[in-house]
Image (cartoon, rainbow, N blue to C red):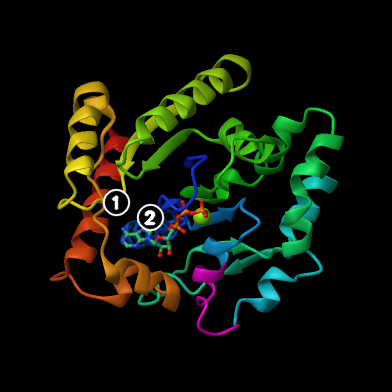
Amino acid sequence: MAIISLINRKGGVGKSTISINLAAGLATYESRKPESKPVLLIDMDDQLSATITAMGGGLDDQFVPIITAENNFPSALINGFGASEGIVEDSLLPRKREKKVKIFKTNKARMENLEAELKTREEPELQLTYYLEPIKNDYAYIIIDNPPSAGIVPMNSLVASTHVLIPIEPDGLSLIGLADILRMIESIRKNFNPELKILGIIPSRYRMVRRQSRDVIEDLERLYGHLLLPYVKDLAEISAATTAGYDIFSFTNEKSQAYRCISNLVDAVLGKLEA
Ligand SMILES: Nc1ncnc2c1ncn2[C@@H]1O[C@H](COP(=O)(O)OP(=O)(O)OP(=O)(O)O)[C@@H](O)[C@H]1O
Ligand SMILES: [Mg+2]
């Protein structure tokens, strides 16, 4: 069992895209085992991009019942731990596999209020940890997508996680942002979760033609070489799959660059988890 958070306080770096594809890739890997457990994808971001993609994407509105549910994840999280009955659903991903990634029914309005509600609780940073405690062993992997913030919501995710993945878009300021995230992780380790491991840094939306991106990758290799995972190129097919509500493995085939990029990443994550 591993609980993996995708974190970056910067927006648009590929957290949600990697979350859904990693969840789909891990579910596929897990389904090949004789005794497999499901993968759970938790969406901690009130934009709900991961949920929307996992439930069919922005091109139709199949996701609406899932994001307006009466019995929903943010309420269960605030009202007491362990109450996950009736809120776990099969998502549509991986599209081409029988065993689907699980997802929580949620509620957009409640999610928008989650930060404020968490702050009214005792031990606000520990609510997700308590919530997951009785159910985490039902899953092979739990992937947590996070909002672009460094507030109490991603703090809950980091406190509850065994591992963290940091997608960064290699540009001029990303190294400064990365230093901030590493400090946040250090403080979580010190105060709440000494076992939290950095699984890796993922250069994301990488455009090789850009001189600046290549320079940042060089710096990353020099400074954080041991943490660097395979990079994900900026490819139209990756965003098209997300918009259509598909994982990349079901949207295209092994011959496509996008498929291979994400598949290399999933393999590297599995390699590191099993090392
Ligand atoms: N490798 C990629 N190639 C092309 N487009 C990508 C890639 N990764 C992400 N995108 C696109 O970039 C946009 C932002 O990606 P995504 O939503 O995954 O980022 P995010 O970090 O989750 O953003 P936010 O912080 O707002 O939640 C989306 O439109 C997505 O389709
Ligand atoms: Mg996102």
Q: Which mark is residue 22?
A: 2
Work out whether 238 lies above or below 203.
Answer: below
Q: Which residue is mark 1?
A: 266
Give the amino acid type for the residue marked by disc 2 in the picture: Leu
Check contact, mark 1 vs mark 2: CB within 8 A: yes
**Earlier residue among tags 1 and 2:** 2
Position of residue 228 measured from the top left corner of the image (x, y, whole percent): 26, 34
Residue at the bottom extreme?
A: 60
- Residue drawn at x 68%, y 65% is 105
Specify the quadrant of the image occupied by residue 35. Answer: bottom left
Work out whether 96 lies above or below 30.
Answer: below
Give the amino acid type for the residue marked by disc 1 in the picture: Val
- Residue drawn at x 22%, y 53% is 207
In this picture, residue 130 sits left or right of residue 270: right
**Residue stretch in magenta:** 52-61
Q: CA distance from mark 1 to mark 2?
A: 6 Å
State the residue in front, 182 or 95. 182
In the rendered view of the protein, which quadrant contains the C terminus?
A: top left
Position of residue 91 measured from the top left corner of the image (x, y, whole percent): 53, 70
Position of residue 128 measured from the top left corner of the image (x, y, whole percent): 68, 40
Specify the quadrant of the image occupied by residue 152. Answer: top right
In this picture, residue 63 sits left or right of residue 201: right
